[in-house]
Every structure is written in C-alpha cells, then in structure tokens.
Amino acid sequence: MPTPVIMLTPSRMAVAERQLAALAVCGLAADSVMAAFRAVTSFVHGSAQTEIALRDYRDATAGPAVTRPARHSPPRCAT
C-alpha cells in the first residue's frame, strides 16, 4: 500500500499549532498534549481513509445502475 505524502505547508502548521494550543489549556504535560494530538489525528485520518475505501468499494461493486453524486458536490439540505 503506498504511503501518502503529507506536505508541511504554513496552513497545515497553523492548524497543528491551533490544535496544540487548544490542548495546552487543559493543564497537561507536553508529552500528554502530544499523545492526545497524535491520537486524535490518527483517529481522524483513519476514519477518513475508511470512508473513502468503503465508498470506492461500493462504487466498484455496484455496477452501472447506481449513480452517485460527484465527490465535490455540496451537501443537500433537508427542506
């Protein structure tokens, strides 16, 4: 399985700094803050990868009769 390449951009670093600042106010030690940060980040990435894999599997096994909205379409609001 290929390993994703994660680019360290200023925007990505700003997000990480905000997350660490939010955890720092909890009064945790630096090691505990990093452990919590990594745990949440791993959970989010794993959940996203699982959802993508399930969608791709459904798309591959559903056949041509099933139509799915485009990946980047805005969510539909209930009226």
Image: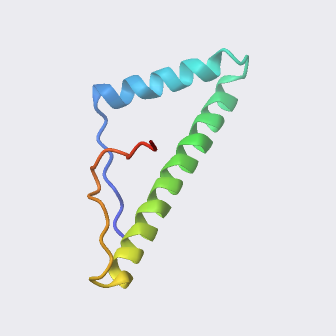
Residue 62, quarter of picture:
bottom left
| Between 66 and 36, the one nearer to me in the picture | 66
Q: Quadrant of the N terminus?
A: bottom left
Position in image of residue 12 (x %, y %): 35, 31
Render colour scheme: rainbow
Residue 61, quarter of picture:
bottom left
Number of numbered tags placed on the structure image: 0
Q: Quadrant of the C terminus?
A: top left
- Up the image or down, 69 lies above or below 58; here it is above
| Between 62 and 21, the one nearer to me in the picture | 62
| Between 66 and 51, the one nearer to me in the picture | 66
Q: Residue visible at 41% across and 68% down? A: 55
| Between 35 and 67, the one nearer to me in the picture | 67
- Up the image or down, 16 lies above or below 41; here it is above
Residue 22, quarter of picture:
top right
Position in image of residue 33 (x %, y %): 64, 28
Q: Residue visible at 36% across and 71% down? A: 56
Left/right placement of residue 29 relative to residue 66 reads right
Position in image of residue 38 (x %, y %): 57, 41
Position in image of residue 51 (x %, y %): 47, 61
Which residue is outermost to the front?
A: 79
- Up the image or down, 53 lies above or below 17; here it is below
Left/right placement of residue 65 relative to residue 34 reads left
Q: Residue visible at 48% across and 21% down? A: 18
Q: Residue visible at 29% across and 41% down? A: 7
